[in-house]
Image (cartoon, rainbow, N blue to C red):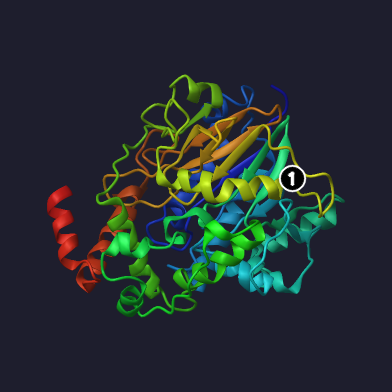
Amino acid sequence: MGSNKLKLLAISDTHLGEETSLLSFPRGLQQLWRTLAKDKAFWAPIFPDFDPDKRVQVEDLVLLGDIPDRTLSSTSQISANTHAFAMMLGDALEIERAVYVPGNHDHTLWTGYNGAPGITSYRGRDVVRNGGCLNDRAEEILSIFLGYPIGWAWWALEKAANATADGFVFSVANPVYAREVAGSTYAFAHGTHFRSEMVPGWEQGLLRAGGMSNLDHLLELDLKPGGNLEEVEDMTGLEEAVSNFVDSLWPSSKNSPTSRSDELWYLLTLLREGSEMIRESPESSAVFSREGLSNGAADGRVAKLTDEHGEPSSDSLERFRKLFLPHLKTHLQDGSSGGEGLPTGELVFVYGDTHQGGWGELNVADRSASVRVYNCGGWVVDGPRTHPACHLFAVDDEGQEFILDVSFAKDLEGKSVQVSDKTLLQLAGRDAEHRIEAVNRAGLAFGRGWQYLRRRFG
């Protein structure tokens, strides 16, 4: 199947710095490194002749939002964990370009860099090329991701740039990055712009507590109202409609270990889901091709995001189809920033945000075509009984699509992934339980309702 090269590799919702993220633990990073760098059985469906002594080449690594968790972790926490994450990926893979697409938990990094609400072209905006920072406003992003200007990751980039003419490129794309591979257009967005909180009335439906003013009072937040998403005319209008609201709902906790939004996040999660989602721990990491997914090879392990008629299985994708997809197509066809735009006849949409993972074929509103959709899952443990959907999305050198599902139940030698006397999943799950208990003790609007939910769904 050719060289060990991927055109695209995407990862989302690592929530680095958050104690419930598997990749905030050194042992978690080590497990992912061993899978990507050394596991021949894992890579066999894509690279039958995989050589663990040679790194897999990646043209575009897409960091699909909520990579550092700026809302739930302090700046020092996310800087240390994200820098370690970047070092791990740089050692496991040979990456030509990394593209950062902000999510909701790290959106303030984008507005701080851009200086105001706004978007880039779907090609993104380069901020590092050949070992040099192209824009002083990018220093905060680069310090968190690469340790700029004196971190080990940045030093390695400068050293590599001095040794070769083809240096590493780091770009930022908001809210969409896209490119064409083998006749298909691949569009990547976190999912912030079609979250339930973006739709007017979300807080009444979740809290039944009298609306935004009560929510704002209870959590001592200074929430900025968003615009009407049904009235925006393009992607720029969509970003302007949600930007200030997103930044006020998920602000940076700065130098505090957590913020009031920490409690809000768990409050919304608990009331939205009602109970803990159970996902069994896969025995080992595995790769599933698009054909294998269609044939049911990953049933019970990779969620199906649409039904047999192409209808979405979640409200999230319904909002995508109604509120985001029309603007996405126009955005991709726009060639104003150079080039002729991208075709949208064979469109593949990859997103994160929900932590669900999965794939599907989504009918568009007029049923004239479909959009293939993939969700990259997440790396946050919601409770002691759940293994998160630790998915990566990949496209190989021949244009074939894959979901890479990484297991943290056992290491490559078949032993449990241990940290001291507990497994990594147990430790992260314990932190999730502690967070839930803290929210419950705070009695945030739903005290009695949450007790009911625990008795009802316990």
| Residue topped by disc 1 | 333
Instruction: Mark yes or no: residue 420 visible.
Output: no
Q: Is residue 285 visible?
A: yes
Taking the spot 55% from the left edge, 31% from the top edge, the residue there is 367
Which residue: 84% across, 53% down?
163
Image position, residue 31 (x, y; %):
47, 44
Residues 125 and 155: in front is 125
How many numbered circles are shown? 1
Circle 1 crowding by C-alpha within 10 Å: few under 14, some 14–19, many from 20: some
Q: Residue 203 in the image: x percent, y percent?
A: 35, 64
Identify the element where label 1 is drawn: helix
Q: Position of residue 176 (x, y in %)?
A: 64, 52
Snapshot quadrant of residue 349: top right
Residue 96 vertical position relative to residue 21 in the rendered view, above or below = above
Q: Seen in the image, is 140 located left or right of residue 204?
A: right
**Identity of the residue furthest to the right in this view:** 165
In screen coordinates, is 77 left or right of 332? Answer: left
- Residue type at mark 1? Gln
Q: Looking at this view, is 138 or 370 the one in front?
A: 370
Image position of 153 with respect to 62: above or below: below
Which quarter shows the N terminus?
Answer: top right
Decide if residue 392 is on the left or right side of residue 417. Answer: right
Q: Quadrant of residue 234?
A: bottom right
What residue is at 61 percent from the left and 46 percent from the top? 326
Q: Residue furthest left?
A: 455
Q: Nearer the viewer, residue 212 or 372?
A: 212
From this view, report whether residue 337 is shown above or below residue 11: below
Image location of residue 111, percent across then percent down: 62, 70
